[in-house]
Image (tube, rainbow, N blue to C red):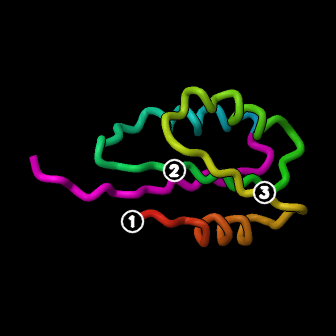
């Protein structure tokens, strides 16, 4: 069998106080069909949520079959800067 190059995919999850909706977002990510030839990483860019957003994501870590990288901020960056930092952190193909 021919050796195929692995395809690296980053999933950007941007959030700020999404406690009511973050479980649905995580479930949606987990519903995706992943090819065995893909190396997947989830980038969680939380913008200093003050609710239970991060706790809900962390409760799902055992269900998430790929690497998770948390991008932390010392202060609220705002939507535009939060998007920018997660896209700058992407290394996927």
User: Which circle marks residue 41 in the picture?
Assistant: 2
The residue at the point 35 percent across, 40 percent down is 34
Tell me where residue 65 appears, x and y as whole percent.
49, 34
User: Which circle marks residue 93 in the picture?
Assistant: 1
Helix, strand or loop at label 3? It is: loop
- In the rendered view, does 73 fall on the left or right side of 13? right
User: Crowding near pointer 2: few (<14 within 10 Å), some, many (20+)?
Assistant: many
**Alpha carbons under labels 3 and 2: distance apart:** 16 Å
Residue corresponding to mark 3: 72
User: Which circle marks residue 59 in the picture?
Assistant: none
Q: What's the magenta region?
A: 1-18
**Alpha carbons under labels 1 and 3: distance apart:** 23 Å
Q: Quadrant of the C terminus?
A: bottom left
User: Crowding near pointer 1: few (<14 within 10 Å), some, many (20+)?
Assistant: few
Helix, strand or loop at label 2? It is: strand
Looking at the image, is mark 1 or mark 2 earlier in the sequence? Answer: 2
**Alpha carbons under labels 1 and 2: distance apart:** 12 Å
Asked if 32 appears above or below 16 in the picture, the reply is above
The residue at the point 73 percent across, 71 percent down is 81
Looking at the image, is mark 1 or mark 3 earlier in the sequence? Answer: 3
Tell me where residue 68 appears, x and y as whole percent.
60, 46
Looking at the image, is mark 3 or mark 2 earlier in the sequence? Answer: 2
Callout 1–callout 3 Cβ contact below 8 Å: no
Q: Residue 14 sits in which quadrant?
A: bottom right
The residue at the point 63 percent across, 29 percent down is 60
Asked if 87 appears above or below 35 in the picture, the reply is below
């Amino acid at each position: 069998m021919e050796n195929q190059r692995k395809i690296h995919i980053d999933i950007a999850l941007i959030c700020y106080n999404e406690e009511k909706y973050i479980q649905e977002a995580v479930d949606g990510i987990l519903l995706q069909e992943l090819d065995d030839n893909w190396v997947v990483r989830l980038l969680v860019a939380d913008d200093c949520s003050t609710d239970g957003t991060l706790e809900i994501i962390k409760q799902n870590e055992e269900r998430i079959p790929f690497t998770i990288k948390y991008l932390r901020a010392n202060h609220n960056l705002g939507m535009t800067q939060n998007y920018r930092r997660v896209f700058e952190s992407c290394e996927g193909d």
